[in-house]
Image: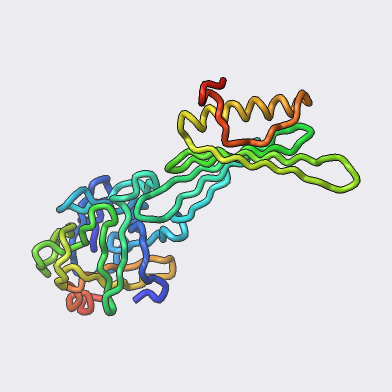
Amino acid sequence: MSANLSFGIYFIRSAPSGTVINVRGAGRILVGSALDYDQAGTQLFEFKRFQDRFIITNIETKLVVDMSGGSASPRTPVISCEYHGGHNQQWHIQPHGGDNRFLLPSRRFWWNANSYG
Amino acid sequence: MDLAGGNLENGTEIFGYETHRDLNQQWEFIGVTEHMLGRQIEIPGPERVIEKIIPGPERVVEKVVEKVIPGPERVIEKIVLGPERVVERVVERMVPGPERVVEKIVVNFHDSPETLREMRELRAQILRALEGQEIIPKVSGERLGEGGHV
């Protein structure tokens, strides 16, 4: 868990591509947009601490980042939807390397993440 | 969270996947508090221009333009562009005499037909004053064009 990251609003940028995550209404979360301060609503996410995990909410749509259907299977789409408090809407933040990079395992995937990590 | 197949193209979907720690599972957080909210940029140029982005439920971009008008008096025109356009003009004038007297006039305008008319009138007064033609009168509540007076 990152000691530095607490409550706050962040862009989430993919390390290899340099582009950020954005939300287009309920459903799909995509990566590939250039960071844009003027159109930032769909690119900005509020991180709210919940025990040792985070709820990640898009500030424009108010929808949260969610593992679709609560599935723990590989290749489960990550979507945005209404908050319901399930494990599939809770995310761990693990520092990776020294370059301010993080892994974002789902609480729903946590056992897998530890097994494979 | 995993970029499907390590694909970096625009519009790539994100999936859950076993943790393997490769690049396509690594994410960076760009803090808004550092980079956006309260962001203040000074734009280089002959005028001092500051762009500020103010945090809040509504995103507000405020642009402040400060211009020092050269002349015998120190005149600073400050234009704040925000939800409302506000023009503030500060005129500082040293009054000659045995004591040091600084006369300072600060006028704020908000966009409206009335205030724009006032602004034009005051601008004309200041320009005349700067040319040494007359003294700047105090701004009163009396407005031109009202009560049958022009």
Of residues B71 and A12, the one nearer the viewer is B71
Observer able to see residue A43: yes
Of residues B141 and B118, the one nearer the viewer is B141
Q: Where is residue B144 in the image (x, y as percent from the top left)?
A: 56, 25
Quarter-of-image position of residue B123? top right
Q: In this view, does B148 lie to the left or right of A101?
A: right
Q: Residue at x 51, y 32 (%)?
A: B115
Residue lying at the far front of the rendered structure: B147
Q: In this view, does A15 lie to the left or right of A87?
A: right
Total labels: the figure holds: 0
Q: Position of residue A103 (x, y in %)?
A: 30, 68
Q: Which residue is drawn at 18% across and 65% down?
A: B17
Of residues B67 and B117, the one nearer the viewer is B117
Observer able to see residue B47: no
Q: In this view, does A64 lie to the left or right of B82?
A: left
Q: Is residue A95 left or right of residue A66?
A: right
Q: Residue at x 21, y 71 (%)?
A: A90
Q: Work out whether B75 lies above or below B34.
A: above
Q: Where is residue B98 in the image (x, y as percent from the top left)?
A: 91, 46
What is the quadrant of the N terminus of chain A in the image?
bottom left
Q: Which residue is drawn at 24% across and 63% down?
A: B1
Quarter-of-image position of residue B107? top right
Of residues B85 and A35, the one nearer the viewer is B85
Q: Which colour scheme is used?
A: rainbow
Q: Work out whether B77 lies above or below B100.
A: above
